[in-house]
Image: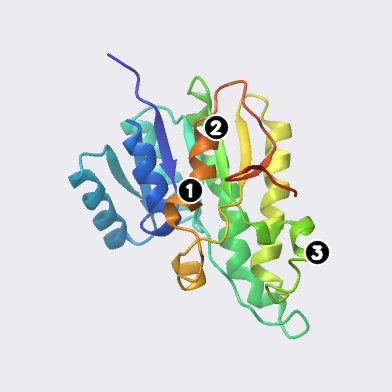
Amino acid sequence: MAITTTALVTGANKGLGRETVRRLAGMGWRVFLTARDIDRGTAATQELAAAGLAVEFVPLDVTADESVQAAADIVMNRAGWLDVLVNNAGIGGPMTPPADIRAADLWDVFETNVFGVVRVTNAFLPLLRAAGHPRIVMVSSGLGSIAATTDPDLVGLVPPALGYPASKAALNMITSQYARALSDIRVNAVDPGYTATDLNHQSGFQTVAEGTDAIIRLAGIDSAGPTGGFFDRNGRTPW
């Protein structure tokens, strides 16, 4: 009996997360689709399963310790290991000008985009270490790149804001530090690019398929693949 590659994607009932699940399952993988909204997560799973894909729903709210641990327990009971963890769940945060924002206004975006990633990653480490060749993919953003956001050719495209860019910059550093600490796991961050999703009110110029190209590539790297890197669909991109 062939051993099936297993993957789990957070925040996967729509957008980049759902497309990532669809593409990984289309490769013959067993994929756990997670979402904090049970109805939406169940509906997305049923739609993909109806297309013949090996997709299973697991409730998971990245902001709640109990929910994350319960999800890890479910995957342990069903599969026993996890080859790939895709930390995709994220929110946009306020676009309030930096001079006008309050510290409390940043809490939710950091709770999801930063603390949630740490919470999920650490809870699933035992499952990842039970796999032969584990990988973690952090879904970041070019807005978290200091090089990109200070580029004179790009700086005027997006108004300055603290929440989302700062949370993704923090996620980039978290990626780098996990990669340094976890020599047995390949850990990388990806910039999907400006993709049409609910996060940007469908204003992106890329399709969700294009936006998931880097995620799929990094999820499928072999044991000699990169770790501690930041990639977009064209290859390495500056931190």
144 or 194: nearer the eye?
Answer: 194
The residue that label 3 is drawn on is 150
235 or 94: nearer the eye?
Answer: 235
* Crowd rating for badge 1 (residues with CA inside 10 Å; few <14, some 14–19, many 20+): many
Q: Quadrant of the N terminus?
A: top left
**x, y percent for residue 78:** 31, 32
Query: The residue tagged with tag 2: helix, strand or loop?
Result: strand
Query: The residue tagged with tag 1: helix, strand or loop?
Result: loop
**CA gap, disc 2 and disc 3:** 31 Å
Return the mark for residue 212: 1
Q: Is residue 236 above or below residue 28?
A: below
Sequence-earlier tag: 1 or 2: 2
Residue extending furthest toward the left: 50
**x, y percent for residue 200:** 51, 70
* Crowd rating for badge 2 (residues with CA inside 10 Å; few <14, some 14–19, many 20+): many
**x, y percent for residue 232:** 61, 47
Residue under the image location 56 percent in, 48 percent down: 119
